[in-house]
Image: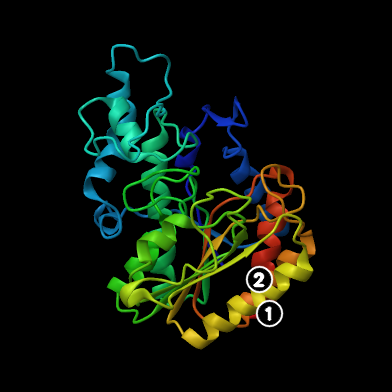
Amino acid sequence: MKIVYSEVHRGHAGAKEFVNGDFVPMYEKPERMDMILERFRAAGFGEMVEPVSFGLEPARRVHDAGYLDFLREAHALYQREPEAAGDVAMPFAFGMRGLRQQPGPSAHAKLGHYCFDLSVPFVAGTWPAIETSCDVALTGGKILRDGARAVFSLCRPPGHHAMRDLAGGYCYINNVAVAAQAALDAGAGRVAVLDVDYHHGNGTQSIFYERDDVLFVSLHGHPDQEYPYFLGYEEETGAGRGEGHNLNLPMRWGTDWSGYGEALDIAVGRLHDYGPDVLLVSLGVDTFKADPISHFKLEHEDYLRIGGAIAGLELPTHFVMEGGYAVAEIGVNVLNTLTGFEEAA
């Protein structure tokens, strides 16, 4: 299996996030990639491939042009603010309901308009990392179209929380959504996205919610208990032409394989019935029992089962990296997923 990866992500580092009343070092950090790569090298797994540049046109197919301009300019714009303190740009005032919704020229206005939480800081290296992460996903999609059975796009920063014009949850450009749209633009008739990250892919859902050419299926922590809280309920099944093209399978804290495996069977059954030409997998391994910001109880061996279940669909499959914050174990769980897939394929 080819693994698309770039070192450019390392420039997106050094910021903090706001968690439970305190600013703490970000859980989404470069060391996550180091542990995955270390595990791959130790196992002799995969062939590493550098991404190629696709420009921003593919991202404009799913994201607002003004939003993409903001992502590119946010850090430099903040540095020009008279009261800019330090190197990190973060929002502190949000364009909520009842307020004027069109932002003015201030960096603070734009940050509050285009971000929905405090987990998407901007440092000098953030935009190159965002742009390259999108290229990683697009390169993976091209490899799949060129005839590969499967490919893994090792994206950082992740993407599935990013909406059409909102950043949040460590996500800026929705890599999997851009890759899904690129597959459609290249001739795929039907595309499916399976999101196995612990947190609901609110961004991916919102982008495709009223469309009938992409099926979105998500297994995640129940929004009654878990981030992003405002989406991910069972009754969200799509709207308009998209009715029936959105399946949420939320689960409560403490879910182990007995419950997760049942939900995965439902997800795989729905994907089988849909019969997509291409399957994209938002691969988050924050469902692991030791993940510091999640509350499922999956074991290492359960990721072998997840990979095997996905392989059973017998579809061209594009794995796109999302979350997973138990840094010491992230490589084991990612490798197990991909190994389970390859062994069952």
Query: Callout 1 environment at 10 Å: few (<14), some (14 to 19), or many (20+)?
Result: some
Pick the front one: 286 or 137: 286
Nearer the observer: mark 1 or 2; the answer is 2
Alpha-carbon distance for marks 1 and 2? 8 Å
Dot 2 lies on which element?
Answer: helix
Compare marks 1 and 2 and give the one earlier in the sequence. Answer: 2
Q: Residue at x 38, y 80 (%)?
A: 190
In the image, taking residue 328 as reference, residue 317 lies left or right, namely left
Tell me the tag on residue 179: none
Q: Which residue is mark 2?
A: 307
Residue 139 can be seen, yes or no:
no
Tag 1: amino acid: Ala
Quadrant (top left/top right/bottom left/bottom right) for the N terminus = bottom right
Q: Position of residue 159 (x, y in %)?
A: 45, 51
Q: Are marks 1 and 2 in contact (CB under 8 Å)?
A: yes
Q: Position of residue 110 (x, y in %)?
A: 29, 33
In the image, taking residue 327 as reference, residue 22 lies left or right, namely left
Query: Callout 2 environment at 10 Å: few (<14), some (14 to 19), or many (20+)?
Result: many
Tag 2: amino acid: Gly
Q: Which residue is mark 1?
A: 344
Dot 1 lies on which element?
Answer: helix
In the image, taking residue 186 as reference, residue 154 lies left or right, namely right
Quadrant (top left/top right/bottom left/bottom right) for the C terminus = bottom right
Render colour scheme: rainbow
- Relative to 134, does residue 79 appear above or below in the rendering? above
- Relative to 310, does residue 224 appear above or below in the rendering? above
The image quadrant of residue 93 is: top left
